[in-house]
Amino acid sequence: MFWRKRREEPVTVRDAEPPPWQSGTHAVTQPEDDAANDALDALGAVLRALARNAFDLGDLNAKSIEKKLEGWATHILVCGPVPGTEESGGARAPRRNFNAMVRAVTEHRKFEREYVSTTITELRSTLWSFVTTLTRSLGAEESTDTRLRERVERLKEAVTSDSYEALRAEASLTANVLADVVHEREERARRQAAELGKTLRSLREQLEEANREGALDPLTRIYNRKTLEEVLERSVGLSALAREPCCLLMIDVDHFKRVNDHYGHPAGDAVLKEVADALVRCFPRRGDVVARYGGEEFAVVLTGSTMEEAVRLAEKPLQAMRALTVKHGAHAIQVTVSVGYAGVRTGELADTWIERADKALYAAKTGGRNRAVAAT
């Protein structure tokens, strides 16, 4: 530990009056603050680990990030110059600037998160542009020729690589080639579309996992509205591409305004959290998506479920809420919900799908609440 102070030699106290519990001449040794030393060692090791594992962030390359973090490690360990002052003749710092170090690492972490989030968003947009184009192609009874098959193979290779740039470029080129494809037998086109749909669904799950934290509602910790809208867009595309059924449930907490007015907004927040948790328990399948649509309104996307199955599934939140009692302070709050549901139609837009389910929800509420109504 080259930055520590050297342990001092014992100092003999001769002139001072010895304390009452001592007698004679005694040696006093200056103790070393081992806990503080270990903490600084650990902090320096963490900074150097971040430096060694730095990666390119667009125009900001890994080498410059590594240099900056290594500079902070040196500053913390041996009071080296604060990073950024070296070229102006920065000398050893008189003391460690912990606050500046924390700000620098925090800002770097935020930049990393923004870069990854932006990259994933752009990737998702390009991929689903490809899905939309392929869907239109299949709707016109078109299928792939040799050029398109080769391009799809290159896209598959790009999907398994670590390069987002390569994936985006290959997806864009594939979408352009689709305009020139030749007609083939319809059965062959369906088989290839089903296989491609399977690959894209797998990729969708991976992207959702990577971006899960930024897609959550801060109060209920379930998906937020923005994520729900993305899921609905993808579900519409996949339903047309892979002939996969899908249903949407719109769920509204009955008389929620009364809860806020009578018990207060903290109690209302507690109700929303409990309702969200109950909905997650009602729909535990991996393909199901539970989201907060806004205010006291929730939505559930049931991938692979037909309208016949939705009739049964729509009863589950009704039964769960009837058995739910939300405890807040000294209060016990009873909760019911109304449900409207609709299956996606071939060629339907996500907005139209939501509108039909929302009209069914309105019919449930005007019909007396605490019930489920299917879209007509």
Image: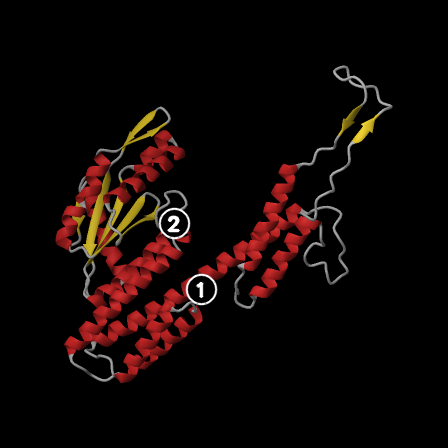
Question: With 58 as the anchor, is 255 left or right in this view?
Answer: left
Task: Determine which quarter of the picture holds residue 51.
Answer: bottom right
In depth, the one of 268 and 234 nearer the eye is 234
Q: Residues within 10 Å of mark 2 (few under 14, many from 20)?
A: some
| Local SS, label 1 | helix
In depth, the one of 41 and 245 nearer the eye is 41
Q: Outermost residue, top direction? A: 20
In depth, the one of 160 and 6 nearer the eye is 6
- Of the residues shown, which amino acid type is indicated by label 2? Leu
Give me the residue at 81% from left, 28% from top: 12
Q: Residue 296 appears at what percent x and percent y?
A: 32, 43
- Of the residues shown, which amino acid type is indicated by label 1? Thr
Residue 347 in view, yes or no: no
Residue behind mark 2? 216
Camera-near label (2 vs 1) is 1
Mark 2 vs mark 1, CA separation in Å = 18 Å
Q: Residue 234 appears at what percent x and percent y?
A: 29, 62
Residue behind mark 1? 119
Question: With 200 as the anchor, is 83 left or right in this view?
Answer: right
Q: Quadrant of the C terminus?
A: bottom left
Question: With 198 as the anchor, is 24 left or right in this view?
Answer: right
Q: Earlier in the sequence, mark 2 or mark 1?
A: 1
